Image (cartoon, grey):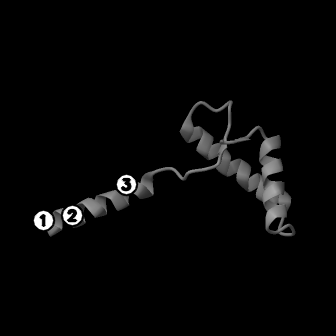
Amino acid sequence: MRAKVLFACLCLLLVSGCLPKNKDWTHPQMASPRKEDELFQVDSQFCEDKIGAQPTGDAREKALADCLTRLGWQRKE
């Protein structure tokens, strides 16, 4: 019985690592969730590079949100 519970927990742990990360942004022109995730990583990196290291805290979050919005991303409600 204990082995079955441990096996079930191990399976859940492995599967949870394969699930996509939950993000607060969506792109209305992207139909495929996989392509949307790839584009989000590319656009996020672009915005991080554009912002640089200077802004911190809320100012950084606002600058990142502004950049993603200009690229067509919308916040999920």
Quarter of the picture containing the C terminus is top right
Q: Amino acid at mark 2?
A: Val
CB atoms of marks 3 and 2 within 8 Å: no
SS type, badge 3:
helix
Q: Position of residue 50 (x, y in %)?
A: 84, 57
SS type, badge 2:
helix
- Left or right: residue 31 versus residue 16 is right
Q: Is the residue marked by circle 3 packed among few (<14), some (14-19), or many (20+) residues within 10 Å? A: few
Label 2, label 1: how far apart the Cα atoms are: 7 Å
Q: Nearer the viewer, mark 1 or mark 3?
A: 1
Looking at the image, which residue is at 33% across and 57% down? Answer: 12
- Left or right: residue 32 versus residue 63 is left
- Residue, disc 1: 1
Q: Amino acid at mark 1?
A: Met
- Residue, disc 2: 5
Q: Nearer the viewer, mark 3 or mark 2?
A: 2
Residue placed most toward the observer, 45 or 24: 24
Looking at the image, which residue is at 25% across and 59% down? Answer: 8
CB atoms of marks 1 and 3 within 8 Å: no
- Residue, disc 3: 15
Q: Position of residue 4 (x, y in %)?
A: 17, 62
Residue 57 occupies which quadrant of the picture? bottom right
Label 3, label 2: how far apart the Cα atoms are: 15 Å
Quarter of the picture containing the N terminus is bottom left
CB atoms of marks 2 and 1 within 8 Å: yes
